[in-house]
Image (cartoon, helix red, strand yellow):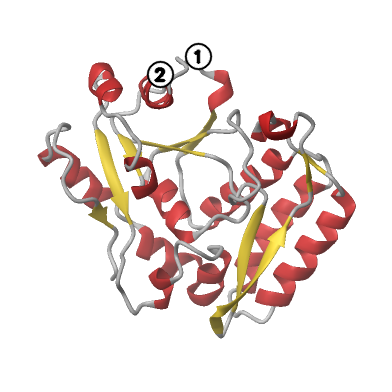
């Protein structure tokens, strides 16, 4: 089972949950960079008030303008970005009783900032470090190393098939444009994925907006991993569902 997604800086919990449920994450870094997306920025939320938020942004140079891919994007001010990341993450989460786990994620990102000015490398590291903190044992692959067709859905289907994935795990955003035909042709069922909605649980209430660093700081890596563990449920759903059945998205457990 694979998830295919752009690298995001300290990704939102809704994104991290999809990766955690998959057996592999295919990093889609050879598509167009979007300044209004989460590819170089994340919303940090106050520990005791997640409604109070601040953008953490890595100033980015796009050598080819709007045609610049995520892989081609470079940090405009690497040293300043490193100082900002270190300062803000510590400022927001340094008082957490789970700070040791957060600090390991932060240190991995700071180490990467010491060695590269490629935005994709930094954001990729931030996601992998978060997954590692939760004990995820899947694999990470890069889309640019896998030959595919050019169509959007065709390309995703080719990536899933080429990596031997049994299913393509698709979020609600992707379902709005996805054509399942290419997946049917490659024999890779599409399995919808969605985190809880309409809930008073702050963990999920803010899951699509703020960085998952907040959830990690709130409940710690072990508890967060337990909250995200839907692999058995997804396997059960996929074994019963015909891949042509596009029923309501599966929702991750709230327990």
Mark 2 lies on a secondary structure that is helix
Badge count: 2
- How many residues crowd mark 2 within 10 Å: few (<14), some (14–19), many (20+)? few
- Outermost residue, front side: 66
177 sits left or right of 108 in the view: left
- How many residues crowd mark 1 within 10 Å: few (<14), some (14–19), many (20+)? few
Q: Residue at x 59, y 48 (%)?
A: 8
- The residue that mark 2 highlights is 162
159 sits left or right of 244 in the view: right
Can you give x and y, in whole percent of width and height, for residue 9 in the image?
63, 52
202 relative to 110, above or below: below
Q: Residue at x 74, y 33 (%)?
A: 65
Task: Using the rendered view, name the quadrant where residue 22 is placed.
Answer: top left
Q: Residue at x 36, y 24 (%)?
A: 157
Task: Name the one closer to the observer, 138 or 146.
Answer: 146
- The residue that mark 1 highlights is 147
58 relative to 185, above or below: below
Which of the image's four quarters has the N terminus? top left
Which of the image's four quarters has the C terminus? bottom left
215 sits left or right of 177 in the view: right
Task: Name the one closer to the observer, 89 or 155.
Answer: 155
211 relative to 70, above or below: below
- The reply to whether callout 1 and callout 2 are in contact (CB within 8 Å) is yes
Q: Residue at x 24, y 50 (%)?
A: 249
């Amino acid at each position: 089972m694979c998830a295919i997604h752009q690298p995001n800086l300290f990704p939102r919990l809704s994104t991290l949950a999809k990766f955690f449920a998959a057996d592999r994450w295919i990093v889609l870094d050879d598509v167009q960079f979007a300044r209004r997306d989460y590819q170089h920025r994340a919303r940090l939320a106050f520990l005791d008030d997640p409604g109070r938020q601040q953008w953490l942004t890595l100033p980015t140079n796009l050598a080819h303008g709007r045609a610049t891919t995520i892989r081609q994007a470079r940090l405009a001010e690497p040293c300043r970005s490193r100082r900002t990341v270190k300062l803000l993450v510590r400022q927001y989460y340094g008082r957490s009783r789970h700070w040791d786990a957060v600090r390991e994620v932060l240190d991995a990102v700071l180490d990467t900032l010491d060695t590269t000015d490629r935005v994709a490398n930094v954001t990729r590291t931030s996601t992998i470090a978060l997954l590692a903190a939760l004990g995820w044992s899947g694999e990470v692959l890069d889309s640019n190393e896998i030959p595919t067709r050019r169509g959007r859905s065709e390309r995703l289907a080719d990536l899933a098939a080429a990596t031997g994935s049994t299913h393509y795990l698709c979020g609600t955003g992707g379902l709005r444009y996805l054509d399942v035909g290419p997946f049917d042709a490659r024999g890779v069922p599409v399995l919808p994925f969605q985190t809880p909605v309409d809930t008073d649980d702050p963990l999920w209430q803010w899951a699509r907006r703020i960085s998952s660093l907040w959830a990690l700081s709130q409940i710690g890596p072990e508890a967060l991993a337990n909250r995200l563990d839907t692999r058995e449920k997804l396997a059960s759903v996929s074994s019963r569902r015909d891949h042509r059945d596009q029923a309501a998205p599966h929702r991750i457990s709230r327990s």
